[in-house]
Amino acid sequence: MERAAMAQLQEWKARKNRKPLIIRGARQTGKTWLMKEFGRIAYENTVYVNFDNNRIMKDLFAEDADTVRLVRGLELYSGQKIESEKTLLIFDEIQEVPKALTALKYFHENASEYQIICAGSLLGVALHAGTNFPVGKVEFLDLYPLSFPEFLKATGNERCEETLARLDFDMVAPFKSTYIDLLKQYYFVGGMPEVVAAFAVRRDFREARELQQSILTAYEQDFSKHAPHETVPRIRMLWNSIPAQLARENKKFMYGLIKEGSRAREYELAMQWLCDCGLVHKVHRVTVPSLPLKASEDLRAFKLFALDVGLLSCLTGLAPHILLDGNELFREFKGALTEQYVLQQLVTLKNITTWYWTNDRNSAEIDFLVDTGTDVVPIEVKAEINLQGKSLKTYRARFSPRIAVRTAMTDYKREEGLINLPLYAVHMIREVTDFALVSQRQ
């Protein structure tokens, strides 16, 4: 399948001043496949090393960080000649050998000609635990589940994706029902690569659900295997509370929903563990929607989303037959799936950071604010076609943003300072708002 991250890897390869690259992402988001596929198409030779339960690698990196010696050892281990400009070195599950992480610093400083990509399913947990990390000596690439445009390509709907990418909304409009049907499929199937690959071949929703359940089971096993023993029950309770948290009208995370009387301090480690694993996204509230948004971030108030809309629908027990019941899917859980979907697309956009806003009385809420670097763009999310809502009107009257976005199951329309953007095109928000802002200045 085609991943947008492949273009980022090609850009990394082309740079003369590249550093060792670390791919971050939750388990089963396709990190290993991406690294191997990149090696296959971009290099003459690939040396792949998995550090999990690898005593030879632990011993090799334990002695010292002499890069000449390390390369010789990797050649002996792989049985291959490592030529710096022709060979891609892949270190998988690198967190299992912390000294290999430290060695990346010396590869950058003393042997920068070698091209190294690393990944690890629980890398974030390892780093947070205090690994001697080579700060400033590596680069990062974040890998998420497939976005909606990647899903379209993977399921043989490339023409639909290309039309959206051209912002050809006049062409999109007659095929609106097709896009809505595909979006419903994505809400259910989600973007986990194994699930999408199976669905692309057999179009079996029940198989998709079984695969999602197996992924969730693997995550539960990770809790028990890798998390501190005393924290495991809280991790499970917090993780399983996400559907109920998002089902609330006010989606601010409430510790009391996990267990009556719960307090934040009791779940700090559990929350940190899930964040470090990449299994959840925290979206914080801001009190004043002006640049920089970070300056007015309220660390006590946040929404918590899962990493994938398909896994969220699996957690909630959403049945396949709902796909056939008109727009019922988009009404489930008070729009929880829709907000999850929108957030999932926003996090894949480069150089965009996401928050949300409520007024002091919590009587008005903007679902998401994105910081584009030059503007704060408010985004109101509607699950269906009803565009009536006071919050965006209140926000615009109070803060006068240059551009605002309302995304729903409606056609594209641009009015004075307001864009109605179809949900299935929300991944094009940067291009759409940039075009609108340029038009304002002309």
Image (tube, grey):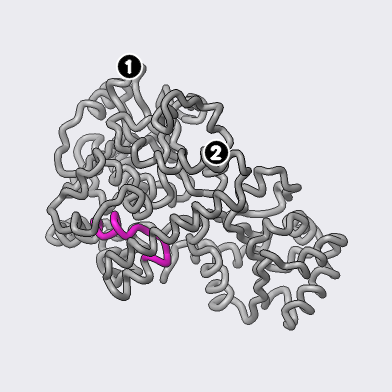
Residue 294 seen in the figure: yes
Give yes or no for residue 80 being in the magenta stretch. Answer: no
Type of the residue with mark 1: Arg
Residue receiving disc 1:
361
Residue receiving disc 2:
270
The percent position of residue 90, horizontal first and vertical second, equals 65, 68
Q: Nearer the viewer, residue 383 or 113?
A: 383
Circles 2 and 1 in contact, beta carbons < 8 Å: no
Residue drawn at x 52%, y 61% as measured from the top left:
8
Classify residue 101 by image quadrant. Answer: bottom right
The quadrant the N terminus occupies is bottom left
- Identify the main secondary structure in magenta: helix
Residue drawn at x 36%, y 49% as measured from the top left:
315
Q: Residues within 10 Å of mark 2 (few under 14, many from 20)?
A: many
Q: Which residues are magenta?
A: 183-195
| In this picture, residue 293 sits left or right of residue 110 | left
Number of marks in the rendered image: 2
The percent position of residue 124, horizontal first and vertical second, equals 60, 48
